Structures are given as C-alpha cells and as structure tokens.
Image: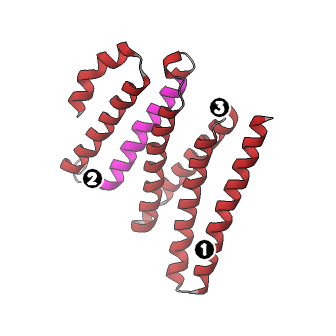
C-alpha cells in the first residue's frame, strides 16, 4: 500500500483533487497499520507495538491535518471541510485510544500520553473555536474529553469496589454529555449572529 501511495503521488499532486489527497493519506495509514501488524514495531522490541502504532498514526494524521488546514487557505481545491473532518476523526481516535490504552493497561506510563493528549485537546479546541470555527471538530474534541475522563474516573471507581459509585459515574456521563451539547449550541448560536 505504501508503494501504491508512492506510485499515485504525481497523479494526486497534478490533479489537486481533495478526494485523491484523502485516498493517498488513507493508503499511507493503511500501510502503517499493516506494517505494524507484520513487524510489530518500528524499533523491534524496544517499544510496545500497540503504543507505537497509536503514536505513529497520531503523528502522521496530525501533520496531515496541519498541512491540509494551511494549504486550504491557499488552494481553492482543498477548501471543502469534509476531508479535514475525516483526518481529524482518525487523528482524534489515535490520541484518545492511546490515552485510554495507557491508562487502563499501563498506568505507570500514563503521564506522558495524558499530557500530550491534554496539549492536543487544548490546541485542537482553540484552533477550531478561535481560528476556524467548526462545530463538528469541537464536538469531536468534547467526545474525546468525555471518553478519557470517564475512563480515568471509571478505573478508580471500579478499583474502589463501591457499587454506589457506578450510579455517580452514570450521572457524570449524562452531565458531561449535556454540558457539551449545551456549550456546542451556544457556540453555534454565536456563530450565526
């Protein structure tokens, strides 16, 4: 798949068609996933394969999203919003899955991924709130925050063994979802006025 992406690169560059750029990026993502499925890690046995795959997908798609947003200001062909949203879904999934995976399976290694997740979330929310308003992107950031926070809280509640705390957990999920929906409606109203 990497060779296919390499082979179609001139065609994609010449065409300046956003769907082809997205196909090219998906081929790179697929090549990366299949590489890790075969070889399990970039550096052999030094790093955990699952962890490294999430880092690589996050890095690749963060770079792609940054370049796409920058180029969309200069190239009319890249002004459609749906490709950025697809890239942001993969990007957000990778860093959110990494934060959840490390929190659940490797709590001793959770500080760095959680700090990077927090930094990503702040940059992501500020960029799509202040620089280029996009409700879809903001909703994705809210979903990521809810998933990671509830995973961390749920882990501590399950470890404590208190059954009544599960009710608190369900109330917190509903409150966070309602709070995110209210905030997104407020942002949407501000953008329309």
Q: Distance between the residues labelled 1 and 2?
A: 39 Å
Please determine whether, in this image, residue 127 is positioned above or below residue 50.
Answer: above
Among all residues in the image, which is located at the extreme top? 14
For the residues carrying marks 1 and 2, which lies nearer the camera in this image? 1
Residue 44 lies, with reference to residue 32, above or below; the image says below
Residue 66: say if magenta.
Answer: yes
Disc 3 or 2, which lies upstream in sequence? 2
Residue tagged by mark 2?
46
Sequence-wise first label, 1 or 2 = 2
Q: How far apart are marks 1 and 3 (CA)?
A: 33 Å
The spot of residue 19 in percent (x, y) is: 40, 27
Residue identifier under label 1? 170
Residue 48 position by quadrant:
bottom left
Q: Are discs 3 and 2 less than 8 Å apart at CB?
A: no
| Left or right: 36 as drawn, with respect to 143 | left
* Rendered image: mark on residue 137: none
């Amino acid at each position: 798949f990497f060779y296919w992406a390499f082979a179609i690169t001139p065609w994609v560059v010449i065409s300046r068609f956003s769907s082809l750029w997205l196909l090219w990026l998906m081929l790179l993502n697929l090549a990366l996933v299949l590489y890790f499925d075969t070889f399990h890690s970039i550096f052999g046995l030094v790093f955990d394969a699952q962890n490294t795959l999430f880092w690589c997908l996050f890095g690749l798609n963060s770079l792609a999203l940054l370049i796409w947003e920058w180029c969309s200001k200069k190239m009319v062909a890249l002004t459609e919003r749906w490709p950025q949203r697809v890239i942001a879904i993969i990007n957000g999934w990778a860093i959110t899955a990494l934060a959840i995976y490390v929190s659940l399976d490797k709590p001793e290694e959770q500080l760095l991924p959680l700090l990077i997740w927090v930094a990503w979330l702040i940059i992501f929310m500020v960029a799509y709130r202040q620089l280029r308003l996009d409700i879809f992107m903001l909703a994705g950031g809210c979903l990521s925050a809810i998933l990671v926070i509830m995973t961390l809280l749920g882990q501590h509640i399950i470890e404590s063994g208190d059954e009544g705390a599960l009710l608190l957990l369900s109330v917190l999920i509903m409150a966070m979802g309602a709070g995110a929906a209210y905030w997104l409606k407020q942002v949407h109203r501000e953008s329309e006025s």
